[in-house]
Image (spheres, grey):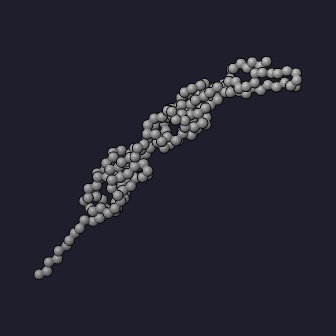
Amino acid sequence: DTTFKAIFEPEDYHVTIQANNPVMGSLNYATGMYAYGTQLYITAAPNPGYTIEGWEYQPSAGTSATVAYNVQALDHDTVFQVNFKPIQYMVTTYVADGDGSVSPSASPVDYQGTLTVTATPGAGKSFKFWKIGDQVVSPDAVFTYTHTTVGTVRLDAYFADQVYRVRTATNGSSLGEVTGAGQYEYNDVAEIT
């Protein structure tokens, strides 16, 4: 008599585990071969400023940070991908000092996204700079701001009185003197004698 014995082993499957953008976050498992019957608890960890948009292959997981999956359910190699996306934060603009206007007054901006803001001086005013808190961020009235803060931001526009230079002269130095030359702000009265 001869006995034949069959030995079976679980089949391995190649499981690709990836993020749509590794700058936005990471996963606790790496791509590799996993045996049939392996239980995977794939956890996504968004970096600051990002959130989970959803999972490909198992969309029912929604925006959950952890997906449990049994490789037993696989019958072929597969890809698990988490899709991260930037969080939007509100950026507001404000006239902090002087006379002028700003636009837009408020706008949602993606983390690491940009927003172009414009400061328009009022009559007799000039633009000085944009500030966030105590820090000057741009001397330009039209400024493209890159949002690198995890949270809301207020951009303050500062204006100043425009300064005008008044020069005086005579048509001949022997005929007399003229005084009152100098720098004057908008609406100042220059006394020229």
Front-most of residues 186 and 88: 186
> In the picture, which quadrant includes the N terminus?
bottom left
Front-most of residues 62 and 175: 175
Q: Residue furthest left?
A: 1
Front-most of residues 5 and 64: 64
Q: On the image, which quarter does residue 177 sit in?
A: top right
Q: Residue furthest bottom?
A: 1
Left/right placement of residue 170 relative to residue 79 reads right
Where in the figure is residue 19, as x and y percent of width and height? Answer: 40, 53
Q: Residue furthest front?
A: 174
| Number of residue marks | 0
Above/below status of 72 relative to 165: below
Where in the figure is residue 153, as x and y percent of width and height? Answer: 48, 34
Above/below status of 44 relative to 106: below
Q: Residue at x 29, y 64 (%)?
A: 12
Where in the figure is residue 160, as x and y percent of width and height? Answer: 62, 27
Q: Residue at x 54, y 31 (%)?
A: 156
Where in the figure is residue 105, as x and y percent of width and height? Answer: 53, 30
Left/right placement of residue 156 relative to residue 56 reads right
Left/right placement of residue 142 relative to residue 170 reads left
> In the picture, which quadrant includes the C terminus?
top right
Q: On the image, which quarter does residue 34 sit in?
A: bottom left
Q: Can residue 85 be seen here?
A: yes
Q: Residue at x 28, y 58 (%)?
A: 71
